[in-house]
Amino acid sequence: MQPQHDVIVIGAGISGLYQLHTLRQRGFKVRVFETGTGVGGTWYWNRYPGARFDSESYSYGYSFSKELLDEWDWTEHFSPQPKTLEYLNFVADKLDLRRDIQFNARVAAAHWREETRDWHVTLDDGSEHVARFLVTAIGPLSTPTWPKIEGIDSFGGVSCHTARYPKEPIDFTGKKVAVIGTGATGIQTIQEVAKTAGTLTVFQRTPNWAAPLHNATISKAEMAEIRTQYPDILKRCQETFSCFLHTPDSRAALEVTPAEREAHWEKLYGSKGFGMWQGNFRDILVDRKANALVSEFVARKIRERVKDPATAEKLIPKNHGFGTRRVPLETRYFEVYNQPNVRLVDIKETPIERITPNGLQTSAESFDFDIIIYATGFDAITGSFDKIDLRGTDGRTLKDTWTGGPKTWLGVQVEGFPNMFMVMGPHTALGNIPRSIEYNVEWVTDVIAHMRDRGLTRAECRPEGVKEWTDHVVALGEGLLSNEVDSWMTGINRNVDGKTVRTVARYSGSAPAYRARCDAVATGGYREMALS
Ligand code: NA7
């Protein structure tokens, strides 16, 4: 079978849409395969109540097109999912992207063919497609995981995972609702469902440190003002550590006086977005003493906000410090537990034994529910790769290649997988993700264009490059308190076989350093790669 396309892109989320656009702009014939029935990726699937950005909307949208920036109005500082999905549809229409996207199309397998130097892709429906290059734009958090609880299929009411939430909203009025999971997703869901549910029971295994979001609407006049500031906003995102508007304070918590510390933390706790996590003193995520102090500050806030002291204690994490897991941002989350219709069940104390036709059974009690929402997270970073039968040279699978943790070159290539490029793969700078995506996508497009212009048909990273980058990523993670804690960021998900040992799957250096490294490869004529 001859190649029908220059490039096959898997996924039509923020990465895939921009990858399609940049490649098309450079004259490539591109086909995008997307499992969903529409564009949006993360923002297509995560329709759960309360889903929204934790990054400021105006720092999150695409930055490459003045026209898009000029024509799109954000309505809230932290955009809710329906508006974000509307935005991504607006982008797809504006750039006329849909004609090259096939929806309802899940890639089941992608095999490299050395003799013809191309990728042979098979969809779920058995159809086959061939392209010279393969770009994975499948997202780091896109394969939802359900808990392994006995009887999960026996429930007679409505149940769903937050990342597979139905398109028709569920009405909670007067209903008995359960939410299992208290990560960033669970917290957004809980604070929304609590507004209308008859009763809401939250099943918490591990509490997470959360900080206030301080969302607000954006008026037309304010949006006009923001638009004039776009150059500064986007420039700042390019300069900060993780592409957020917030970046670590140059001072250490332990260098300043207790009064200065307190004042800084009060200010951060009272300001919008990720400041408390990303704009904090530079030592809180590496120094145990500094981390204990900031954790104590946030614990105090929880105790002030939750009326029942026993409930407050349950909501305060004891097994990890503030910021060592992804910090959920919340809007009156802790106050939810002061409502008479809301109850917190600590399932470390009384584990869930089984889901029953009417609800669920813990070791202490039987509960009846109309609705159970699973906010139980994702098989993060490598999970979406594992679901595809990806085979490189000699038929070796990617899953086998990554046993014991991912090994990559710059997070964009894998040894033995020529002509495959990853956008937001393991070992790339995630941070404020669209900013990282735009860089990654443009870099990949440049390599592919470089090859075409020189008649080159095969690109593979070199083994020594993979070792150097993987060692570098592991070294960057040393000393970070977050790498001592179980979370999706350290590759742990006990709902997935084999994801019980911590791995370093995230690049934890700065985004500017990452870009400088990748820029050097490009300006060096990609000599670090084996191109032929
Ligand atoms: P997370 O952060 O992985 O949270 C999943 C939650 O579900 C967490 O509280 C888990 O408890 C809980 N969980 C997982 N499995 C079970 C079982 N079997 N029983 C009970 N509770 C369970 O996923 P999110 O979707 O909230 O957020 C993922 C990222 O998406 C987020 O960080 C943002 O970047 C966007 P645990 O902590 O494992 O004890």
Image (cartoon, helix red, strand yellow):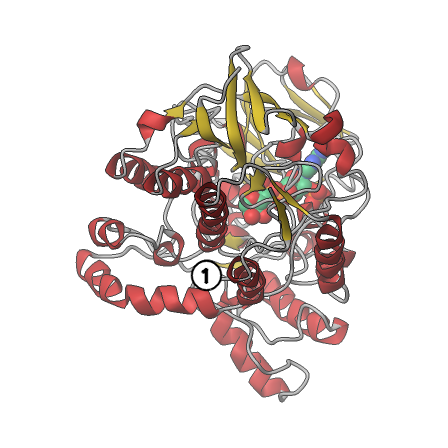
Residue 225, image x, y percentages:
22, 65
Q: Is residue 410 above or below residue 251?
A: above
Label 1 Cα neighbours within 10 Å, binned few <14 / some 14-19 / many ≥20: many
Seen from the viewer's position, the closer of residues 346 and 253 is: 253
Quadrant in the picture for the C terminus: top right
Q: Nearer the viewer, residue 207 or 447?
A: 447
* Residue at 54% across, 57% down: 525
Q: Which residue corresponds to mark 1?
A: 273
Ligand 1 in which quarter = top right
Task: Return the x and y of residue 50 as percentages of the image width and height.
Answer: 44, 42
**Residue type, mark 1 in image:** Gly
Q: How many numbered discs?
A: 1
Residue 277 quadrant:
bottom right
Out of 109 and 189, give the one closest to the viewer. Answer: 109
Quarter-wise, where is residue 509 in the image?
bottom right
In this view, the residue in front, 515 or 310, is: 515
User: For the point 76% across and 44% down, which residue is it?
Assistant: 405
Q: Quadrant of residue 177?
A: top right
Q: Is residue 174 visible?
A: no
Residue shown at the point (57%, 54%) measured from the top left: 526
Question: Which percent across, then down, holds residue 292?
Answer: 72, 70
Residue 420 visible in the snapshot = yes
Query: Which residue: 69% across, 52% down?
Result: 314
Q: Secondary structure at mark 1?
A: loop
> On the picture, is 490 further left or further right than 102?
right
User: With respect to residue 77, does 391 lie above or below?
Assistant: above
